[in-house]
Image (cartoon, helix red, strand yellow):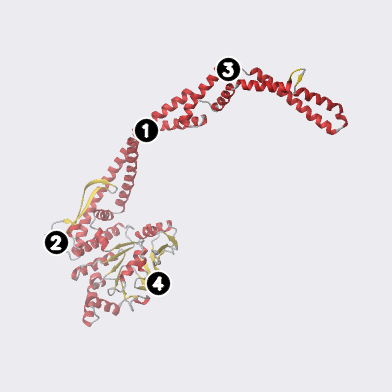
Amino acid sequence: MIAELRIENLGVIADATVPLGPGLVVLTGETGAGKTMVLTALNLLTGGRADASLVRTGATSAAAEGRFVVPPGSTAAAQAAEAGAALDGDELLVVRTMTPASDGSPGRSRAFLGGRSVPQAVLGEVAAALVTVHGQADQMQLRAPARQREALDDFAGPSHQDLVVDHRRAWTARQDLAADLADLVARADERRREAELLRLGLDEVERIDPQPGEDTELARLVERLAHVEDLRGASTAAHEALAGVDDTHLGAEAHVQTALRALEQVSGHDDVLAELARRTAEVGYLLADAVTELAAYVDGLAADPAALETAQRRRAELATLTRAHGPDVAAVLAWASDAGLRLLDLDGGQDRVAALRSDLAQADARLTGLQAQITQGRQAAAAQLSTAVSDELSGLAMSGARLEVRVGPADPGPWGADQVEMLFAAHPDAPLLPLARAASGGELSRVMLALEVSLAVSLAADGSDGLAGTFVFDEVDAGVGGRAAVEVGRRLAQLGRSTQVLVVTHLAQVAAFADHHLVVTRSDGVVRASDVHQVDGDDRLAELARMLSGQDSQTARAHAAELLDRVSSWTT
């Protein structure tokens, strides 16, 4: 329920507080007084699009603020808590602000839920569980088959709606399975070609059998064998230079030994020479090792054309792999590891196809079962809704009018496998035709009201909390008058026994049924706080008289008093 609305700088409203109560609340006033701005504010609070042009001229910002009573444990309370909103007891404060456009900018809008800034979409989700707004646009939507199906599902009750939600989720999962299967089948040839290429590559790697680091070792071996004569000449020359050729051509080692013996003879007399003698001895050891290793190297160095050819042939084999799979053997081995895993994945494609087909068959069976239950529920609800709405239409001064809800087969979709169509006949002799073709604007508004009353009665009987906290009707009485207007008021009052109903009306016959009657006036072209007030007693009588005749005359007041007396007798 909405406890209160506060509006600042929105259209013609400078500052107004609109107190609301339970039951049927009507909002009346002269044309242009600002009633529409009250609905605009409510639209903003329920996540509607913000239009910066509505900010009152000269104002720096506009704001709509609403205090909503939210039952503990309700869907709205859970959604608000999930959004991080704080509740004050069982009240939720909702605020929407707008700044006007300037310098070519589109203006800005911000939304607050329980003191927390939230996206507009979140505001809309929470508000959907609190308020249901019906205007002329909603009446037009009732002409659409999808909206008619939704109305029938709402009437069928929460258990049925749970089935529809389950079906929608199962349908989405089934579509995902079908897409995966179609993709897998469509790419079967591509996968086979990829698998064949991988097998060829892996067979080649297995045949050549590269070893980690083998390419580096082969490069060193080929380099050595290809330059064996240069290596032999250089190593021999180095050996002769260090070891000497004969006694007449001493090498470096002999000269170092001569220097060492000279130093050792006097090293006991001077520490500096002793250190130099030690270092010279180390040089001698190093030279001796180098001479030994050079001799061994020269002895082991031999030309081996066969080994060179073998190494070059092996390098050529490895080169075929590195050209195909990477810059070196390490990259080839890494590719082979990845390719083996990918091949296992590709070879498992047929298994996955079979698994997906099995899952798809199970999903289809589940959907078929859900669709059967949904169809059964819709057919049962269709008969009940047809009777309930037809009875309501009779009470709305449309005696003989009838609504028939038909459920027929349709191609399966997220909503099930049914086509729901509402057929309407305005009088007993009229043929049943689709609602979109058969109902005028005034008739459609009463059909909408009859649907809402039927839904409210059904939910109240079930003890369900699915009934929105507030119903808002704009122009529900369009195109009606006289006795029909009285019956519209009566039905709105009946709906108000189950929930809060806010109605903007120009008809005294509707306003007379109000539990709370608010009047909007405008002075000097602006609505201020004192211009929105609840009327009772003589003030209400005067407003009803104005609505009946356009003026507050004794005759009009007498008619208004008579209307109130009749309404009182009808509602007690």
Q: Could you tell me if the residues under marks 4 and 2 are in contact, i.e. CB atoms within 8 Å?
A: no
Image coords of residue 475 (percent x, y): 25, 67
Q: CA distance from mark 1 to mark 4?
A: 66 Å
- Inspect the image, locate mark 3, and give the three-letter code of the amino acid beneath it: Asp
Residue where numbered disc 1 is placed: 191
Identify the mark nearer the N-term, 1 or 4.
4
Q: Is residue 568 above or below residue 154?
A: below
Identify the mark nearer the N-term, 4 or 2.
4
- Inspect the image, locate mark 1, and give the three-letter code of the amino acid beneath it: Arg
Which of 9/439 is in front? 9
Classed neighbour count for the residue bearing mark 1: other residues with Cα under 10 Å, few (<14), some (14–19), many (≥20): some
Asked whether residue 379 is in view, the answer is no
Secondary structure at badge 4 equals: loop
Residue where numbered disc 4 is placed: 59
Image coords of residue 337 (percent x, y): 47, 31
Q: Nearer the viewer, mark 4 or mark 2?
A: 4
Q: CA distance from mark 4 to mark 2?
A: 53 Å
Q: Nearer the viewer, mark 1 or mark 2?
A: 1
Q: CA distance from mark 1 to mark 3?
A: 48 Å
Classed neighbour count for the residue bearing mark 3: other residues with Cα under 10 Å, few (<14), some (14–19), many (≥20): few
Q: Nearer the viewer, mark 4 or mark 3?
A: 3
Residue where numbered disc 3 is placed: 304
Which of 267/414 is in front? 267
Quadrant position of residue 176: top left
